[in-house]
Amino acid sequence: MPTYDYELSAHEKGYAVVAGTDEAGRGPLAGPVFAAAVILPDGLFIEGLNDSKKLSEKRREQLFDLICSEAVSYCIASSSVEEIDSMNILNASQLAMRRAVAGLDPHPDLVLVDGNIARGFDTDTLTIIKGDSLSMSIAAASILAKVSRDHLCAELDREYPEYGFAKHKGYGTALHMEMIRRYGVSPVHRKSFMGFLKKDGKECEKK
């Protein structure tokens, strides 16, 4: 379960404002990649806060509202499908996290970053593998990013109902891949992720 150990250790080293950041949506075949950054008040206990992937949708929604109301500051950002295709998903994910951190007020002097890569941040960073299961700030960011992306997928489902975005959230399920084969690639699909179509001998794009 996440704790404040990393945040407290940072404060002991002289960092006054510590934020956590995480992304959601690196793996899907469609839609932007989202990121969030969060500064939590010292000592805030949020019951049930954990890696967003380990929580039910209902619980994530509840925690989303609680985090937004209790955080010192938070920001949710994204990188577009076009950015993902042009710079690759890793760089686009890093860009989304930097955008989220840039939107915080006050600006942090240390950012706890989920994973083992932190590129281009304008402040000190500490990468934490599986940070969304270890740091309260990163866990909070993971929930804001995940819920925000899920909300967008619900909007995409209304715009492109044939693909079933509300069910699979853009991930490469058998249903989603079959719908792409049937209806072609929509404007919200990541063209750089469509390698399976080449294996099928298909190059199709939705008009």
Image (cartoon, helix red, strand yellow):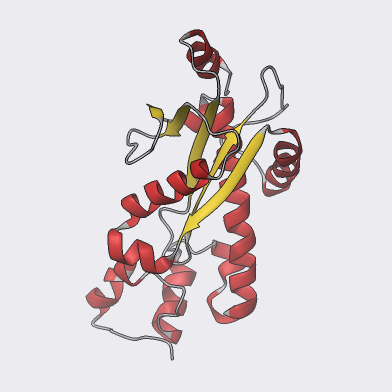
The x, y position of residue 127, in whole percent, is: 38, 29
Specify the quadrant that holds the N terminus.
Answer: top right
Q: Does 116 sit left or right of 11 as displayed?
A: left
Residue 94 position within the rendered picture, expressed as x and y whole percent measured from the top left: 38, 46
Q: Residue at x 43, y 60 (%)?
A: 28
Quadrant containing the C terminus is bottom left
Q: Can residue 128 be seen here?
A: no
Residue 34 in the image: state x and y as whole percent: 50, 53
Q: Position of residue 205 (x, y in %)?
A: 37, 86
The tally of labels here is: 0
Q: List the single residue furthest toward the top.
A: 12
What residue do we see at 59% from left, 33% from top? 106
Position above or below: 93 against 52: below
Residue 125 visible (yes or no): yes
Q: Is residue 48 left or right of residue 24?
A: right
- Judging depth in this view, the residue of 190 and 53 nearest the camera is 190
Q: Quadrant of residue 177?
A: bottom left
Residue in front for this viewpoint, 200 or 8: 8
Q: Residue at x 46, y 30 (%)?
A: 111
Q: Is residue 88 above or below residue 64?
A: below
Left or right relative to 156: residue 30: left
